[in-house]
Image (cartoon, grey):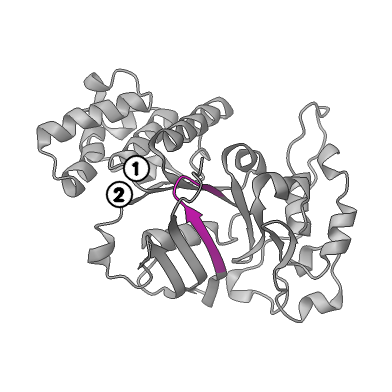
């Protein structure tokens, strides 16, 4: 929980990321801004291709060399955008860490899990081999890996998917980072293990007083795990605010569509899920107006002329839509549906 007067840890202002693709330049992130205080948690939600992971990789300094970054990313007031990679290496795994979607690709199959968990400790904390090994065993024990002292010399393929994800969490937390980015950390896991991993991450974030950015396409995961949220579509933020407020008064048709598409407990077998018609636009072919216009049930011609500005609809609750009054009126009762 954020303490009163907590200092701003990370501040992102008008972030833009242009990537080179086979179809030409693509503006993957457009005008994203947010600030995160120490101990705060923020969720990024949206379908695949909406810019969530690119935003996270920007914070980690892990974008392709050809990427063009504009805007500002500050950590404790120090500018990170366009920071030389040698300087970023001092931050990655140390002050900013990331849990990736797929643990089997995040882990090196050629090295033992003990070697991989100990590496950031040796690189950033200058631990001796013996110190790092001892701390790695303690970390693996803390994240719930069975019998870590005996399994520390095993390789990633010798573990289940849930166990591998626990190893990647231990790696990310080894140096007690200020900011933890969790990018769809439970995508490859079954529902029971998903809950265990999310509970573990939440406990560790609170225990160590870290800030966290949780990326997910699952509104339920966001609702239960973060204080504030941003909904992204077409590389930009279309709705943001305190999580409880956004769920109470969803203002953007896209947010409403995501909510209606969630599986419903108690639904009869064979019931079809509600879907959002159409597909996410290619980043290389984004329209000049509202990026959601082609899929929106409330679209009018003016929606297509320019990207709508953010409109404040409540305390800290903002929506990028020129038809906010209509969309919110149409959404009354959606939470009880």
> Quick one: label 1, few (<14), some, or many (20+) residues within 10 Å?
many
- The front one of 328 and 165 is 328
Figure check: 79 above or below 306: above
For the magenta stretch, what is the residue range? Answer: 32-42
The reply to whether dot 1 and dot 2 touch (C-beta < 8 Å) is yes
- Which residue is disc 1 drawn over? 172
In the image, residue 91 sits, relative to residue 24, either above or below, namely: above
Whether the magenta-drawn stretch holds residue 37 is answered as yes
**Which residue corresponds to the image point at 66% horizontal and 39% vertical from the top-left?**
220
The quadrant holding residue 139 is: top left
Vertical order, 79 against 148 (above or below): below
Looking at the magenta stretch, what is its main secondary structure? Answer: strand
Helix, strand or loop at label 2? It is loop
Report the residue at 38% width, 23% height from top.
144
Which mark is drawn over residue 318?
Answer: none
Q: In the image shown, does 94 or 156 lie closer to the viewer?
A: 94
Left or right for 108, reference 30: left
Q: Position of residue 337 (x, y in %)?
A: 86, 38
- Residue 303 location (% of width, % of height): 80, 75
Q: Which mark is residue 93?
A: 2
Res 326 → quadrant? bottom right
Side (left or right) of 127 relative to 305: left
**Where residue 174 sits in the image (x, y, percent)?**
29, 39
| Tag 1 secondary structure | helix
Q: Give the class, few, some or many, for how many residues have Cα within 10 Å of label 2's Cα (few <14, many ≥20).
A: many
**Residue at point 46% right, 57% down?**
56
Along the line of sight, the residue nearer the viewer: 37 or 274? 37
Mark 1 or mark 2, which has the lower sequence index? 2
Residue at 43 percent across and 67 percent down: it is 73
């Amino acid at each position: 929980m954020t303490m009163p007067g907590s200092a701003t840890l990370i501040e992102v202002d008008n972030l833009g990321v242009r990537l080179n693709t086979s179809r030409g330049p693509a503006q993957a992130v457009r005008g994203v801004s947010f600030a995160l205080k120490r101990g705060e948690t923020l969720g990024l939600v949206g379908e695949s291709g909406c810019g969530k992971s690119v935003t996270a990789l920007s914070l980690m300094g892990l974008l392709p060399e050809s990427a063009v970054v504009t805007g500002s990313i500050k950590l404790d007031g120090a500018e990170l955008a366009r920071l030389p990679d040698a300087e970023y290496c001092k931050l990655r795994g140390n002050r900013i860490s990331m849990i990736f979607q797929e643990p089997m690709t995040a882990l090196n199959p050629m090295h033992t899990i003990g070697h991989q968990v100990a590496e950031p400790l040796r690189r950033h904390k200058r631990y001796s081999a013996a110190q790092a090994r001892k701390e790695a065993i303690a970390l693996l024990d803390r994240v719930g890996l069975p019998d870590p002292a005996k399994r520390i010399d095993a390789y990633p393929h010798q573990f289940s998917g849930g166990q591998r994800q626990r190893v990647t969490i231990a790696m990310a937390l080894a140096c007690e980072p200020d900011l933890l980015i969790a990018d769809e950390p439970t995508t490859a896991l079954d529902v029971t293990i998903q809950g265990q991993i999310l509970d573990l991450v939440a406990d560790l974030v609170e225990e160590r007083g870290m800030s966290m950015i949780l990326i997910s396409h699952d509104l339920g995961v966001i609702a239960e795990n973060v204080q504030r949220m941003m909904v992204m579509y077409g590389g930009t933020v279309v709705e943001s605010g305190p999580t409880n407020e956004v769920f109470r008064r969803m203002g953007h048709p896209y947010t409403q569509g995501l909510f209606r598409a969630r599986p419903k407990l108690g639904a009869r077998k064979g019931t079809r899920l509600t879907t959002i018609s159409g597909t996410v636009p290619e980043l290389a072919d984004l329209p000049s107006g509202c990026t959601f216009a082609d899929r929106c049930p409330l679209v009018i011609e003016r929606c297509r002329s320019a990207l709508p500005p953010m409109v404040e609809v409540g305390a800290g609750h903002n929506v990028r839509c020129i038809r906010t009054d209509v969309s919110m009126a149409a959404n009354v009762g959606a939470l009880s549906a």
